[in-house]
Image: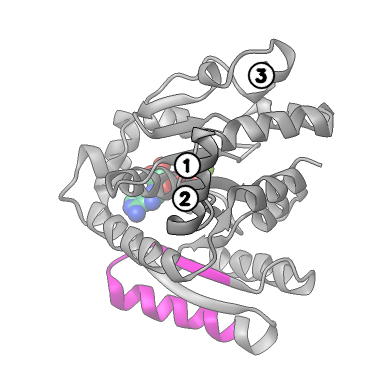
Amino acid sequence: MKDQAHNLKQLLFDGPAREPQVTVYAVVSGKGGVGKSNISLNLALEMHRCGRRVLLIDGDTGMANLDILAGVAGRHSMINYFEDELPLEDILIEIQPGFHLLPGGSGLSGLQSQSREEIRSFVDDLMGRSYDVILIDAGAGVNAKLLSFVSFSHELILVTVPEPTAMADAYSLAKILSVYSIKEEVGVVINQVSGRREALETYERLEKVITTFLNLKVRFLGYISSDPKVRRAVNLQRPFSEAFPSSAASRDIGELCSVLLDGAQIRRTGTLADTVSRFMKVFS
Ligand SMILES: Nc1ncnc2c1ncn2[C@@H]1O[C@H](COP(=O)(O)OP(=O)(O)O)[C@@H](O)[C@H]1O
Ligand SMILES: [Mg+2]
């Protein structure tokens, strides 16, 4: 009775309980080695600093290395959830309270043999942890796993560097997204530039070929300066924004984070239920 009264009061005064919202970002690139993992890790960390509960997923099956970059040792991966019935708590690595890493590697490729029901319960378990942001380091190139992650995400972050080879591969990936109508819009981050000017020049070149030849909207999200501190942090196995907070790269990550978080209010964020169904598409 007391419960009923409480529910009624909630309906009258607060409206129905709002479903928590989660925004899913997928970080992709055409070519490998352009900085996706470093950007994913530091962006996730920055979003966490801004008060978000963040899950970082290492979705790069070929080159899963976020645990190494973050300097945390992952003993388990997703596959242990199914085969050894390990609880999620034992698989997720807590980098900081409210900031978790789901390690990739063999766990991800092994997932293909799981049934939908098993994966559903895994995803329900994951979503039950009420993250505000899920950020996926989705890997490079055009393959089924990457494209699934792309369709699962609300926001696509395409990373490139100014080199012609990386730009050509970024365009090829954009072409696949457009030809197969996988995404209508892509956000672009230019990495390893001398500053905003080179970033914008590079972005404009990419935007020009994409909008001339493809049916795909593009948006400039930001850039990361070429900064020796990034390599130093990689060698220290620490996120650069934590090891060198006043470096140029850390400042740029901060700006990129603000652009994304400001945009998230008005852009597509999904309910948890919506996200679960997107997640199901990735693994089925
Ligand atoms: N902004 C940057 N400035 C300097 N070096 C960078 C920068 N971004 C990436 N790197 C270098 O490139 C390497 C590859 O980056 P990584 O994030 O692993 O790329 P990906 O995940 O796309 O393969 C890093 O180990 C680092 O040495
Ligand atoms: Mg990587």
Report if the CB atoms under discs 2 and 1 are less than 8 Å apart: yes
Which contiguous range is marked in magenta? 186-209
Q: Is residue 216 shown above or below 237?
A: below
Mark 2 secondary-structure assignment: helix
How far across and down, in percent of the image, does residue 156 sit? 56, 61
The amino acid beneath tag 1 is His
Crowding at label 2, few (<14), some or many (≥20) Cα neighbours within 10 Å? few
Mark 1 within 8 Å of ligand 2, using the beta carbon: no
Q: Earlier in the sequence, mark 3 or mark 2?
A: 2
The amino acid beneath tag 3 is Tyr
How far across and down, in percent of the image, does residue 204 sit? 46, 82
Q: Is residue 133 left or right of residue 125?
A: left
Q: Earlier in the sequence, mark 3 or mark 1?
A: 1
Q: CA distance from mark 3 to mark 1?
A: 37 Å
**The one of 143 and 26 positioned closer to us in this rendering:** 26
Nearer the camera: disc 3 or disc 2: 2
Which image quadrant: the C terminus? Answer: top right
Q: CA distance from mark 3 to mark 2?
A: 37 Å
Instruction: Say whether residue 125 is magenta.
Output: no
The amino acid beneath tag 2 is Gln
Nearer the camera: disc 3 or disc 1: 1
The image's mark for residue 6 is 1
Identify the residue under disc 2: 10
Mark 1 secondary-structure assignment: helix
